[in-house]
Image (cartoon, grey):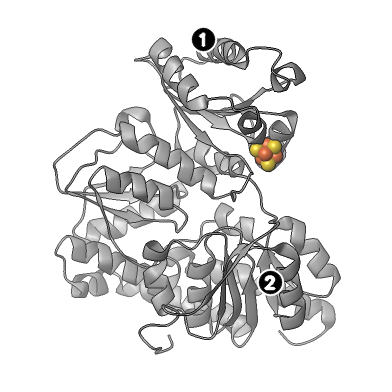
Amino acid sequence: MNDLSPTGCTNAPVLRERGQHEVFCGLTGIIWLHRKMQDAFFLVVGSRTCAHLLQSAAGVMIFAEPRFGTAILEEGDLAGLKDANDELDREVARLLDRRPDIKQLFLVGSCPSEVIKLDLARAAERLTDIHAPHVRVLNYSGSGIETTFTQGEDACLASMVPGLPATDAHNLLLVGALPDVVEDQARDLLDRIGLPQVSVLPAPRADGAPSVGPNTRYALLQPFLGDTSAALDRRGATRIDAPFPFGEEGTTLWLKAVAAAFGIAPEVVDRVTEAPRARARKAVAAAAETLSGKRITFLPDSQLELSLARFLTRECGMEAVEVGTPFLHGPIMAPELALLPGGARLSEGQDVDKQLDRVRADRPDITVCGLGLANPLEREGLTTKWAIELVFSPVHFYEQAGDLAGLFARPLRRKAILSGAPS
Ligand code: SF4
């Protein structure tokens, strides 16, 4: 780990761009959220395009009774010829009749429902009145207008916060949807540190929803949960400031921050995590042989960019050329910015043509970007990594640190093999 100035990129200038952007929309989040919430159903109120996106993104994962679907807005709805609310009510009644296992129904807004100004908040209230207490109906937007794909999870979790039970207890809440096996690892580490009582948002079932109140301390698991964080703050909860648990360093600092919030000394964390830290270091070192000295650019996409740049520069020896992020949540990202080595160009938002010009001028060894930009860049001889893979793959905490580094090393090794050069 490099010993760097304590302020890193804290005061670095940020290039702010507002132009054409190329990212997936927030509907994508349904693909991982529906697996976490076992009695929830996501009903996208959208067009055939939305249905196709979900089907192709979910691919083979759809089987038996899926936990998401699309209420298609037909031409008559879009032209305002029919009352889309009546149709939505009928569709929801049919769905809940057929699926008594559904306890939480999310009406998910889309570009078409936004364009015709369908008021899904009011629809959710009306449908809750009709179907309570068996089903709670919530709504959020997954529209691709001015949003990026990880905002779908943020909007979904934020929609749940006002309805969480109240408590005055001193409790710890983890926020973010992780694969079950990774969530179990986090719980196990916290348990061994002395924090056995941990709740998680989202909970697997509606009746296990976490309680929140003025004595709740919460730790974000993903950097893209700014709206959820603001909603929890409004409930009186306090965010635990920390870098995110990516890589050995990020995980250790995250655990120490959580421990400190409950009066547990950092030495306890050091003792409990000695073995997994050693495993993570060893696994990362294998990939770092390929990554060390290589230059990387992140185009704004997943909102994980700053955290990943911190991990790759400090633990894998890479050099960050440009770190672009769709949104830079200052307070949430402050611990990451403080660790990120100075010298990287920081950018927020996107103006895709200008950004691609900078990539062509910089010619980094690897560029992390969306699917739509990867192919053209590869054709120009640049190596790319799809940002969306970083959200679909288990990458948090110690046991996944080597896999996370490996996700960046693989395309570089492939390129070296194809070109006959040493990696
Ligand atoms: Fe396309 Fe918008 Fe539907 Fe997403 S919400 S699939 S961007 S139409």
Q: Quadrant of ligand 1?
A: top right
Rendered location of residue 380, percent (x, y): 84, 73
- Residue at the image point whose x is 28% and y is 44% from the top: 234
- Number of marks drawn: 2
**Relative to 48, is 251 above or below?**
below
The amino acid type of the residue labelled 2 equals Thr
Q: Is residue 12 visible?
A: yes
- Residue at the image point whose x is 81% and y is 69% from the top: 378
Q: Nearer the viewer, residue 180 or 159?
A: 159
**Does residue 298 appear left or right of residue 222 in this picture?**
right
Location of the N terminus by quadrant is: bottom left
Quick one: label 2 or label 1, which is nearer the N terminus? 1
Location of the C terminus by quadrant is: bottom right
The amino acid type of the residue labelled 1 equals Asp
Rendered location of residue 279, percent (x, y): 42, 73
**Does residue 245 appear left or right of residue 289 in this picture?**
left
Which residue position is annotated with label 1? Answer: 97
Quadrant hosting residue 85: top right
- Label 2: element kind: strand
- Residue at the image point whose x is 33% and y is 66% from the top: 242
Q: Nearer the viewer, residue 331 or 156?
A: 331
- Label 1: element kind: helix
Rendered location of residue 414, percent (x, y): 75, 73
Instruction: Tell me the crowding category of disc 2: few under 14, some 14 to 19, or many 20 or more residues within 10 angstroms, Cα based.
Output: many
Which residue position is annotated with label 2? Answer: 367
Instruction: Tell me the crowding category of disc 1: few under 14, some 14 to 19, or many 20 or more residues within 10 angstroms, Cα based.
Output: few
* Mark 2 vs 1: CB contact within 8 A: no
**Does residue 358 appear left or right of residue 110 in this picture?**
right
Which disc number belongs to residue 129? none
**Relative to 215, is 66 above or below?**
above
